[in-house]
Image (cartoon, helix red, strand yellow):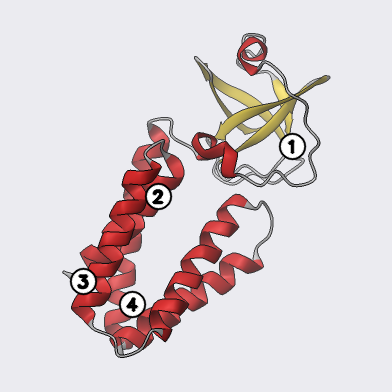
Amino acid sequence: MEGLLLGLGFIGIVIAILTPFFKSGAGLALISMAAYFHFIGTETWLPIVLFTAGLLLIVFEIFVPEFGIAGIIGVILLILGLYLTIGDLGQTVRDLSLSVVITAGVIIYLIKNGYSLSNVNKLVLQTNIQSTKTDETVGKGRIAVDAEGIAATALRPSGKVTFDDDPTLYDVLSTDGHISKGTPVIVDRVKGTKITVRKK
């Protein structure tokens, strides 16, 4: 039961990040997490603070390409917060494993249906990129299948790509999972305003 609540909390975060339904996802996450800690019971705020800090660092890692250390620390804090709350390593692993499996399934489903970090571009930290305002709707009409480009940011799996001599930054989705910044890519599919790419 508790593992399912934790899983619902993670799913809420995923919905808030990958879809336009930020408020619904955030609400689901808050309610589920609160219910989880309520049913488990905790005598101090420290486990909740560690768990929350871990989640925030993991989310930060998602938005900041190639940072790395934030995600690692986030995972450690999240596990530590759960362990201090439950007090049993076995149950901690079971609850976390169940939630991760459920959440992974939801992520795969959403990505296959075209959702990505591009839905929250206003929150994405664009690092080391000076971009100008362009009409991407017009630009996407010039991008065809098999067009070659370079990843301007890490694709995790969404990110920015430039094509040929065009300085425009295009929102794309990788079909090969994580692709590092600077990697040559090729357009796999163009559907409306959605561009999917793979490693060249």
Instruction: Kindly state the secondary structure of the residue where label 1 is placed.
Output: loop
Query: Given this view, does label 3 or label 4 mark the residue nearer the observer?
Result: 3
Residue wearing tag 4: 93
81 lies above or below 185: below
* Front-most of residues 192 and 148: 192
The three-letter amino acid code for the residue at tag 1 is Ala
83 lies above or below 61: below
* Front-most of residues 178 and 9: 9
Residue wearing tag 2: 14
Rate crowding at label 3 as few (under 14), some (14 to 19) or many (20 or more) other CA atoms within 10 Å: many
55 lies above or below 66: below
CB atoms of marks 1 and 2 within 8 Å = no
CB atoms of marks 1 and 4 within 8 Å = no
Give the residue drawn at x 78%, y 26%.
132
Q: Is residue 102 visible?
A: no
Residue wearing tag 1: 152
Q: Mark 3 to mark 4: distance in Å?
A: 12 Å
* Front-most of residues 186 and 160: 160
